[in-house]
Each structure stands twice: as C-alpha cells, then as structure tokens.
Image (cartoon, grey):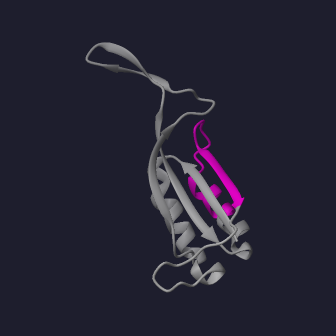
Amino acid sequence: MKLITAIIKPFKLDEVRESLSELGVAGVTVTEVKGFGRQKGHTELYRGAEYVVDFLPKVKVEIALPDDLVESAVEAILLAAKTGKIGDGKVFVTPLEDATRIRTGESGEEAI
C-alpha cells in the first residue's frame, strides 16, 4: 500500500477528483493548506499599499491506495492538476505500513 500526497492549486481540485473517480478511487482526504516553493510568494496591492504574500493557498489531497493503482492515480493527478505555470504543486508517494477501518476493524488493503 502507498499514501499519495498531492499539493495542488485550489481551482484544480474538481478536475483531480473527477480523474481519480474515473479510476475507481473511493477515498480522498482534502485539506486547505498554505505554503511556498520556488515561486516564493508574490506581491499584491490592497488599498494602495503593496504587500508580500509569502504563503500561497494550496490544497493537499491524500489518498491511500493498493500498489497496483498507484501509478495510474499519480498520472491522473499530474494530468488534471497541470497548468504549465509555476506553482502547479508536487505529488509525493510514500509507503503505507498499515491501515485499519475503525468501524469494522478491517486492516490492510481491505481497510482502504
């Protein structure tokens, strides 16, 4: 099992969700986050004053998947989230040792 963590632009969330649904991915956790990478924020003008926005709004999408779905899910995220501009985000894949469904006590791949 693997845990896919994708940091994407907020307006791309619906496209990513639809792409994952087409693959049959059932469980997705979404969190609104802020951060910066190479783009290091930007400046904005508010009531005539310029200020720096260091942390940009992003969305973190987390998905626990069996190994056989990981590659296709990553490809679906990459295609759906890409704008071709700086700040598109990143996708991380990490090993997932175990998972347990609280309601039934199922564990491993049966839990996801």
Depth check: 23 or 93 in front?
A: 93
Q: Give the magenta range.
A: 74-94
Q: Is residue 42 above or below residue 87?
A: above
Q: Which residue is drawn at 59% across and 38% down?
A: 85
Q: Which residue is drawn at 52% across and 76% down?
A: 26
Q: Quadrant of residue 88?
A: top right
Q: Is 77 on the left-hand or right-hand side of 1?
A: left
Which residue occupies the extreme left position in the image?
47
Q: In this view, does 36 lie above or below 91?
A: above
Q: Residue at x 51, y 27 (%)?
A: 41
Counting from the top left corner in percent of width and height, residue 2 is at 69, 66
23 falls in the magenta region: no
Quadrant, the N terminus: bottom right
Q: Is residue 12 above or below residue 74?
A: above
Q: In which quarter of the image is residue 20?
A: bottom right
Q: Which residue is drawn at 63% across and 30% down?
A: 38
Depth check: 4 or 80 in front?
A: 4
Counting from the top left corner in percent of width and height, residue 77 is at 61, 59
Counting from the top left corner in percent of width and height, residue 74 is at 67, 61
Q: Is 93 on the left-hand or right-hand side of 106?
A: right
Q: Is 26 on the left-hand or right-hand side of 99?
A: left
Depth check: 55 or 83 in front?
A: 55
Quadrant, the C terminus: bottom right
Q: Is residue 2 above or below residue 85?
A: below
Counting from the top left corner in percent of width and height, residue 32 is at 43, 49
86 falls in the magenta region: yes
| Total labels drawn | 0
